[in-house]
Amino acid sequence: MTPIEDCREWLRNSSPIAVLTGAGISAESGIPTFRSGSAELPALWSRYRPEDLATPLAFQRDPELVWRWYDWRRGLIARAQPNAGHLALAKWERGCDRFTLITQNVDGLHTAAGSSRVLEIHGSIWTLRCLACAAEWENHATPLPEIPPHCACGSMARPGVVWFGEGLPQGVWREAERAVRACRLLLVVGTSAVVYPAAGLVPMAREAGARIIEVNREETPVSSLVDRVLRGPAGEILPGLLDS
Ligand code: BJW
Ligand code: ZN
């Protein structure tokens, strides 16, 4: 059997299934990834690494700069459509009894594709949170009318995402760990697997005895841990893998 035929059979015969996605699954929707080159980025944002902007310290130093980065990304995402990879996962979920989709992405494209239960372990770019009263609300305005945006209480708001050095939302993270420990098959799609604790879900699944399939254009630190590597764009591989 070819690697893809093996994987198709495992997918058909394994339950529960868990999926971990990263920025690579949204790349074919036109959303830049964090670490795979910056040729497509406007000059302003190509100067920065995620570690320079996605931190509490960066926000403390220059909230306007950080908010401009998020405002630019919100605009790109608002104009983007889910791609064939997102759609294949949503369709697979509908025919699957026990399935958990864990995403590091904050773009909401899995939900837009029709996935009904998505664990957003790094939060959502469409949520705002008040720095003073901790109120949280959804905001889809692009561009934002005011940068930085403010809460009704008058204080500044921040994006409802998880920055470096911050803990992940506890309940969501606990559910992700539970799903990974219980799964018989983990599908890892479009993540560089360098950011923890998300990357630690892969060895966690291994230790729990699950089979693991990686879909990625490039080798990653977890490629050597997995049972099958499917090399290429998720938007091409997932429909072939998941179409029953
Ligand atoms: C394709 C493709 C196509 C392209 N098809 N594939 C243990 C060891 C070492 C360090 C740490 C550790 N534990 C914690 C740390 C520190 C830190 C960390 O991991 N640092 C490392 C970078 C060294 N982690 C944290 O700080 C985390 N917090 C934490 O641990 O807290 C502890 C704590 C506990 C209690 C109290 C307080 C603290 C938080 C991490 C938060 C990460 N946040 C970001 C920003 C989110 C908001 C936003 O979007 O702005 O999350 S950073 C950024 O990286 C974003 C992503 O979700 C995350 C992962 O990136 P991802 O998705 O993998 O994207 P890329 O770009 O890296 O990779 C894309 C991949 O796709 C590539 O492989 C391509 O080949 C592939 N690809 N096109 C298929 N078409
Ligand atoms: Zn407030």
Image: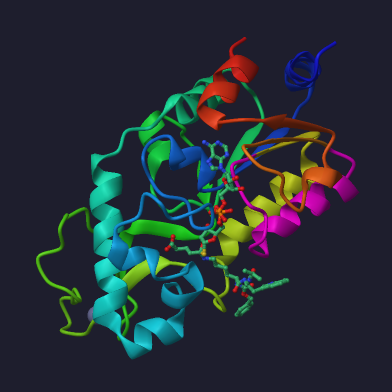
Residue at 43% of width from left, 54% of height from top? 106
The foreground one among 2 and 181 is: 2
Residue 157 in sight from this viewpoint: no
Q: Is residue 7 left or right of residue 81?
A: right
Q: Is residue 223 left or right of residue 134?
A: right
Considering every residue shown, the one lying at the far bottom of the view is 61
Image quarter in which the N terminus is found: top right
Image quarter in which the C terminus is found: top right
Colour style of the rendered protein structure = rainbow
The foreground one among 54 and 91 is: 54
Examine the rendered structure and indicate whether residue 41 appears above or below residue 69: above
Residue at 45% of width from left, 77% of height from top? 52
Provide residue 4's location: percent of width, then percent of height: 74, 18
Examine the rendered structure and indicate whether residue 117 appears above or below residue 56: above
Provide residue 34's location: percent of width, then percent of height: 49, 57
Examine the rendered structure and indicate whether residue 111 appears above or below residue 52: above
- Magenta range: 189-210
Provide residue 137's location: percent of width, then percent of height: 27, 63
- Count the marks: how many? 0
The foreground one among 28 and 17 is: 28
Q: Is residue 193 magenta?
A: yes
Residue at 68% of width from left, 64% of height from top? 197
Considering every residue shown, the one lying at the far left of the view is 145
Q: Is residue 22 magenta?
A: no
Ligand 1, image quadrant it occupies: bottom right
Quadrant hosting residue 67: bottom left
Q: Is residue 48 left or right of residue 22?
A: left
Provide residue 70's location: percent of width, then percent of height: 30, 64
Residue at 45% of width from left, 40% of height from top? 26
Residue 15 in sight from this viewpoint: yes
Quadrant hosting residue 29: top left
